[in-house]
Image (cartoon, rainbow, N blue to C red):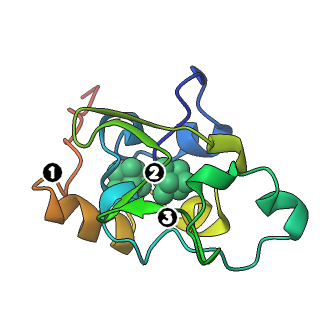
Amino acid sequence: MAASADRDVLSPREVALPAFDCQSCGACCAYSADWPRFSTEEDAELDLIPEDLVAADQSGMRCEGGRCAALRGEVGKGTACAIYDARPHVCRACMPGGDDCLMARGMYGLALELPISPLVGD
Ligand code: SF4
Ligand code: SF4
C-alpha cells in the first residue's frame, strides 16, 4: 500500500523484494471501499487513526467512492498514506506484486510486470 509522505527510507523488506513502487501507485488504496477494513487490530492501534478518517460504522477506513480517505496524491503518479505508521493490518498485508496488488493495478491500467533488468556479466 502507499508509503508515507514523509518517509524517504524503504524498510528492509521493501529493499529485499524486487517490486512495484507503491509511492508512484496507490491503486490498492483506491480500489474498493470494502478493502481497507479493520480486522485484527487492537483498540490501541485503532486509537492511532484519526477519527475523521474512520468510516461512520467504525468498520474500516472512511472511503470516498472506492478511495481511502487517508490516501494522498494521484493514483498511478505519486501517492502516500497519511497514516502510514498506523495503517490497518489489511494494508500491511497487501504486498507489491501480490494478487491483490495486481488486481488493483489492473483496474487502473498500470503495469502488471516489472521491467526486466539486463543481465550483467558474460
Ligand atoms: S497496488 Fe501494489 S504497487 Fe500499488 S500501492 Fe498497492 S501494493 Fe503498492
Ligand atoms: S490506510 Fe493508508 S495504506 Fe491503507 S488503504 Fe488507506 S491510504 Fe492505503
From mark 2 to mark 3, how far is it between C-alphas? 17 Å
Amino acid type shown at disc 3? Cys
How busy is the neighbourhood of tag 1: few (under 14 within 10 Å), some, or many (20 plus)?
few
Give the residue type that dot 2 points to: Ala
x, y (%) of residue 90? 58, 69
Q: Which residue carries the number 1 mark?
A: 111
| Residue 81 falls left or right of residue 92 | left
Residue, x 25% and y 43% (percent of image)?
Answer: 75
Q: Which residue was labeled with disc 2? A: 69
State the CA–CA distance, disc 1 to disc 3: 17 Å
Q: In the rendered image, which quarter is residue 42 located in?
A: bottom right
According to the picture, the residue beneath numbered tag 3 turns out to be 94
Label 3 lies in ligand 1 vicinity (Cβ under 8 Å): yes
* Vertical comparison of 4 with 42: above or below: above
Task: Mark 2 and ligand 2: say if the CB distance to the nearest ligand atom is below 8 Å.
Answer: yes
Up the image or down, 119 lies above or below 30; here it is: above
